[in-house]
């Protein structure tokens, strides 16, 4: 007897929602289940005081992939937001990413040649860097490291940068121009009206069950559909059989203020270790919103505990990657189950990469 659905899709984030839309367009019957109380995964935005809050951290869309840009524009109109974050070190403000404005603010230099000379001079003793601190000093010099990298990195990783492997930073974006645009991509922006409406359009006409955890009753859910697309954590799917994959996680504290403008920019990084949070996001600046109140979010890195805290950033070091490969071999043996997305593939993907991967997976298997 045939099952009620062709596809059960676990997770209503970008990966799952794109698969659901594309497969439905091809005539397949899809059911989406999502354990959170809302669709959108980590891209979910919520409207408060006419401001769209990025509930799980700032999401800035950027890509150079024309196909992806064309595809996403079917579901949203993007504004002209360009990410130009500011670093705050003990009240001193610096332009990011490191560029001629930053060098002028730090050293009073006006030309690329002067800046290059200082960086080279400050990094020259680090001939054979052994850890993240030494590697960073070699790449950008002591001043930038001390003021703009050291404290921020220590907070993000919850470790002294001297104890972190140098491989974490192979390159650091240094620009000898006055360009403060954080991304190098051709297309960039924030969807007008927030991200959630993109997911409402993607899932329009598709059955979605919220607040349901696939892993709570895998067998019964599986019995509903011929094939499963799973976008949750791969280690959780296999009951952590080989152990837990490591993630970095963050707590987001959202705070409302009765005044219109808190920091004058969407993203401000706090690079001093003594400040407990890494960033403050002021959401209204993503959309040039002129409301009388404002919403800001503090980001606090926290220790990760599988199944208790949210898995945000995979820690793709050698031991976690090796562990992932073991889970991947198990996944390859699962009949009619496809693993995808940031958690299913244990890889940090930006939104444009997830879109590309989801479209390719549907095309390759069911095109
Ligand atoms: P997710 O969005 O995580 O969706 C997976 C969904 O599956 C979740 O809703 C989860 O609840 C659900 N799920 C998991 N397990 C189960 C289960 N057992 N049963 C039912 N449902 C389940 N990208 C950018 O391009 N620009 C940015 O500026 C940017 N900023 C980011 C900031 C942060 C803090 C984070 C964490 C990510 C950021 N990203 C950014 C990346 C972006 O969030 C991802 O590319 C995208 O969300 C990945 O989509 P996904 O569907 O793979 O995963």
Image: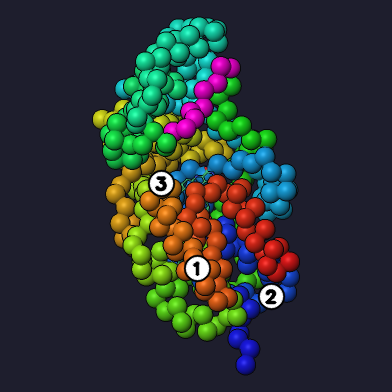
Q: Quadrant of residue 245?
A: bottom left
Placement of the C terminus among the 4 image quadrants: bottom right
**Residue 126 seen:** yes
Q: Tell me what residue is drawn at x 42 percent, y 73 percent.
A: 215
* Front of the two marks 1 and 2: 1
**Residue 201 seen:** no
Q: Quadrant of residue 64?
A: top right
> Which region is colored magenta?
169-177
Instruction: Please give the label number shown on residue 331.
Output: 1
Instruction: Please give the label number shown on residue 28.
Output: 2
Residue located farthest toward the front when viewing the structure as drawn: 128
Q: Position of residue 278 (x, y in %)?
A: 36, 36
* SS label for mark 3: loop
Q: Position of residue 301 (x, y in %)?
A: 33, 43
Which residue was labeled with disc 3?
Answer: 317
Q: Is residue 144 magenta?
A: no
* SS label for mark 2: loop
Sequence-wise, the earlier of marks 1 and 2 is: 2
Sequence-wise, the earlier of marks 2 and 3 is: 2
* SS label for mark 1: helix
């Amino acid at each position: 007897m045939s099952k009620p659905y062709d596809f059960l899709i676990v997770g209503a984030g970008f990966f799952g929602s794109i698969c659901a839309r594309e497969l439905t367009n091809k005539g397949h019957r899809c059911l989406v289940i999502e354990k959170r109380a809302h669709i959108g995964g980590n891209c979910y935005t919520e409207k408060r005081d006419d401001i769209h809050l990025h509930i799980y951290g700032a999401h800035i869309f950027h890509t150079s992939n024309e196909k992806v840009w064309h595809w996403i524009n079917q579901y949203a109109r993007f504004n002209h937001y360009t990410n130009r974050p500011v670093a705050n070190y003990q009240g001193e403000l610096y332009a990011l990413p490191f560029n001629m404005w930053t060098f002028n603010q730090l050293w009073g230099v006006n030309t690329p040649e002067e800046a290059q000379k200082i960086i080279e001079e400050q990094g020259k003793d680090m001939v054979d860097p052994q850890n993240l601190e030494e590697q960073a000093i070699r790449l950008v010099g002591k001043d930038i490291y001390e003021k703009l990298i050291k404290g921020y990195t220590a907070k993000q990783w919850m470790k002294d940068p001297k104890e972190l492997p140098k491989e974490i930073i192979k390159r650091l974006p240094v620009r000898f121009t006055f360009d403060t645009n954080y991304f190098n991509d051709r297309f960039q922006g924030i969807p007008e009206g927030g991200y959630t409406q993109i997911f409402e359009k993607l899932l329009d006409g598709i059955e979605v069950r919220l607040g349901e955890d696939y892993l709570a009753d895998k067998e019964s859910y599986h019995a509903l559909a011929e094939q499963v697309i799973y976008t949750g954590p791969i280690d959780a799917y296999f009951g952590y059989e080989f152990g837990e994959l490591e993630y970095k996680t963050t707590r987001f504290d959202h705070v409302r203020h009765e005044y219109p403008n808190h920091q004058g920019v969407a993203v401000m990084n706090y690079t001093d270790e003594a400040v407990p949070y890494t960033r403050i996001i002021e959401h209204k600046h993503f959309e040039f919103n002129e409301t009388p109140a404002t919403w800001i979010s503090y980001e606090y890195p926290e220790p990760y505990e599988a199944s208790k805290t949210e898995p945000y950033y995979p820690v793709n070091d050698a031991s976690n990657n090796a562990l992932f490969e073991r889970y991947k071999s198990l996944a390859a043996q699962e009949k009619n189950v496809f693993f995808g997305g940031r958690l299913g593939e244990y890889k940090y993907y930006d939104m444009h990469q997830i879109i590309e991967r989801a479209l390719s997976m549907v095309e390759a298997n069911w095109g």
